[in-house]
Amino acid sequence: MSGWDGFLHGLSVALQPGVLIYCVLGVVLGTFVGVLPGIGAMATISLLLPITYYLSPEAALIMLAGVYYGSQYGGAVASILLRLPGTPQSAVTTLDGYPLAQQGRAGVALFTSMISSFLGSFFGIFVLILLSGVLSRAATAFGAADYAAMMLLGLVAASTIGAKHPAKGFAMVVLGLILGCVGTDVNSGEQRFTFGQTELMDGVNLVALAMGLFGVAEVIANIHVAERTGVPRRIALRELLPSRAELRRIPFPALRGASLGSFFGALPGTGSTISSFLAYAAERRISRHPERFGNGAIEGVAGPEAANNAAAISAFVPTLTLGIPGDPIMALMLGALVIHGVQPGPLMLAERPDMFWGLIASFGIGNLLLLVLNLPLIGIWVSMLRIPFRWLYPAILIFVCLGVYSVRGSSFDIFAVALIGAIGYALSLARFNPALLLLGFVLGPLIETNLRRALLISRGDPMVFLHRPIAAAFVLATAALLAMSLLQAIRRKSRGPDRVASVNGEAE
Amino acid sequence: MTITRRAAFMGAAALTLCKPAFAQAAWPTKPLRTFVGFPAGSSPDLLARIVTDPLATALGQPIVIENKPGAGGVIGIQQMLNAKDKDYTFGTTINGPMTTAPRLMPNLGYDVATDIMPIVLVATSPLVLVVAADFPANDLAGFIAAAGKEPEALSYGSVGKGSGAHLTAELFSDRAGVEMLHVPFTSYAPVTTAIIGHEIDAGFMAPSAAMQYVKAGTLKILGITSQKPFAQAPGVPVMAGQAGLPADFRAELWNAFIAPTGTDPAIIKTLNTDINTILADGAVQKRLEDMGWQAAGGTPEDLQQRIAQDTKIWGAVLDRIDAKN
Amino acid sequence: MKHDIHDLASGILLAAIGLFVALYAAGHYDIGSLRRMGPGFFPAILGGVLAVLGLMIALPAWARAGHRGRIAWKEAGAVLAAILVFAAGLEPVGLVPVTLASVLIASIAAPDRRVGWRLALALGITVLSVVVFHFGLKMTVPLWPGQA
């Protein structure tokens, strides 16, 4: 069955009323849990998993998948309006989405994110239909050295985000890398920096870290400020939508983001985080107005949002065609299939075409539904900003705590939120960028384990990074990027300090 | 299969509403809690649910599954031991937290011998030795010959130090008299990719996970670590007694129900009897087999013995690993 | 003489953290070799790098005047206390009492001094969280004391 025939066959599966209803249910639920601070797709899917025992395998998977990509739409809402990202991917969206919201342009930011998410998803679906065979081979072609080199590129590319104070940006990345070391060392089994706490053996909880750094810190900083500035005025419907000039700034960043997302998402690991950071860094680099970034650049919302939605779709490629889940959410999806006696893997496409193509068709239906559902909701989300902050912030705190607890039923993680929140507030006072800390935290363990594994496998020969073509390409790209940044810095210096200030007038 | 299972669940749900006739004097009078040290949807979680659904019917009270994942299942046990209501709290565990965790984790917080009361062994699973489909050797003897050429001529993947895959491979290396390079990963999925992509040579993994790659022609299986052939891996030769391996060579993962010390022994007995009845059911056995497990059963003493036995075997393997580094 | 206090303090703090991490890693974990990097290899290097970066932030800040933001002590105290109470109380006393208590504590920081809206808010959020998490998502968490 060719890709296109398969997709049409899948539509006939996904449009059955008994399946369609769960697709609707999934995306609606996903949107709402995505909007709620703290609770994301991961927690929701693991809480829903036992319920899916009672559904057909197709309906179960389509519903859970709906929750997953639906939460990507919803996650952008909390990131833009409240600077409350549930995941590292949506942390990138806060960089420009939140400044837009503060300028009274929340509607524009939300519209941009919705439409870019939609474009990204459909791009991802087409890539999936046309190239799923190629993408699934990419997953086995990547070895430890290739992963290490790729993560390094992601890290270096993204580190340039906080360019006003390079030392401060790098310090956050390094602090994130250090936090990523906490827990059991994969290679030696050694407990690093756990100080006798069993709860730290699996590392610092990612959701607790994101919620503490962004959510709690933001609440503390805003209680006073929000009361003083008062309630924003009512906004006319026309102001919710971007102007024609702004609209024109969406498609190309979205397409670039979607291409990055489709490629990196298909690689097991943390493709979607890397792709959204890379998309942001790329847009900033090719923009003629890099100074806009961090101050509410439309491109800074469109690129990353398209990237992470495209990645969310293509992440299903290794999960379904190789039985290799790329992230914990995909592992849960795999679990959902196993409950129903379906073993995802190389034989899935041949043995269960209904399920494979039905799921892909449901992506299309689901994303269409999400767009239809979310565009009218923009007005409602924006009017949420008119609720006085003193009514809002205690609710945010409770939902953050419960969301963090729901990840693995651990009170320890809520204590961790308080500590991380205090640190996050201190960092925001000194104007550090917490998104970079989060990036370091996510990529650190992957770089370390893959680097060590690559050297172990090569019996200690560092040349492995140049002998493998994929790794060599990434190493060269990283070197080129570093050289470019260095050159730029030198040129800026020679131009004098006034110019530097205006070029780098971006928020930290 | 889905239909029958759904029907069984519905039946179970309906039955929990009315008390069965045999329920013994006044226990249980309220819902029971089962701690599972792994996330929802993981294999230990699914295994627990296969048993607790019919068990809830038999006991006439719902059983609430509490997923407390972390530290390889240890956090679930710690949480079970912290619960106050002893007669209504029990847990499921895999072999690790009962056998090797005391060696590997300095702050375990419990003593298997004094804090845990075994209930019953639920299921066991052997591991299979896999290599890429184009690996030069086609049997165990050929593999051992290739591995024995020089130390670390071959490499194998595991899911971390002290994991079943690591310990099994080291036990195998010791008994076969070879030395392989250990490459740790975080989960079985990347181990599989690394073998298919020829980054590493071999690995021990669950038969159910390996079989589909064999069918797809990307992996091949050289042997299984159980004492008898395994239904889910048809045609795979038993490793024990082959190619110079001793006849008592055996490495199995297992899954068991346990209770905190202080639980009424009569309750342990009731649970043991009920779970043994459930495990004797053909439909339950089939579901376990589909997931790559073999139903076990037996007395609490059998489980106690299994824990002691495995603690000794794996302790010796860990000694050997520590001596090497 | 004016200093950029925020950068100065944060730089010194980061340098101290970096130094601690590097020394702790070097003292407690095996550094290993290039072929077999030990568990101490990465943290030791990262700690060193962070210490240098911390100094790079702190030193220029000494000679430069900086902005001085207001530190929201009261808000930070109320918010963090609310989270700590929630963490300590969720499992022993249950979702309902702990949510009421945490909302009331968190609302101390709000500038509106009246009591009525606080109680209404606490009740509203409690109902919402029970509906969403207990009934909606079927999270296993006790609602009242004595259910654990």
Image: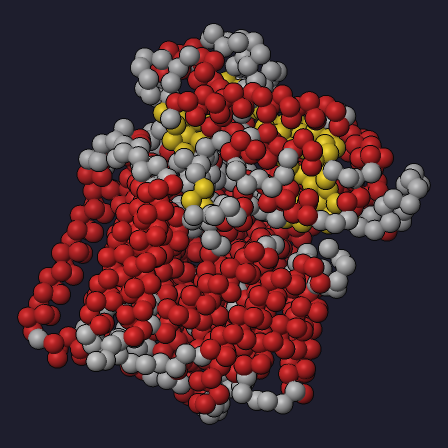
Among the 4 quarters of the image, the one containing residue A482: bottom left
Does A440 appear above or below A224? above
Place of residue B192 in the rendered image (x, y in percent of width and height, measured from the top left): 43, 33
Place of residue B259 in the rendered image (x, y in percent of width and height, measured from the top left): 73, 38
Residue A250 in sight from this viewpoint: no
Does A175 appear above or below A132? below
Horizontal placement of A250 versus C55: left or right?
Answer: right
* Residue furthest front in the image: C1
Which of these two is toward me, A431 or B261?
B261
Name the image colouring: secondary structure
Horizontal placement of C89 versus A508: left or right?
Answer: right
Does A136 appear above or below A64? above
Residue B254 in sight from this viewpoint: yes
Q: Residue at x 19, y 74 (%)?
A: C63
State which quarter of the image contains the N terminus of chain A: top left
Place of residue B196 in the rendered image (x, y in percent of width and height, measured from the top left): 38, 31
Place of residue A6 in the rendered image (x, y in percent of width and height, measured from the top left): 47, 48
State which quarter of the image contains the C terminus of chain A: bottom left
Which of these two is toward me, A190 or A132?
A190
Horizontal placement of A74 versus A454: left or right?
Answer: right
Among the 4 quarters of the image, the one containing residue B59: top right
Q: Residue at x 38, y 18 (%)?
A: B179
Q: Residue at x 30, y 77 (%)?
A: A295
Q: Residue at x 52, y 83 (%)?
A: A389
Which of these two is toward me, A474 or A9?
A474
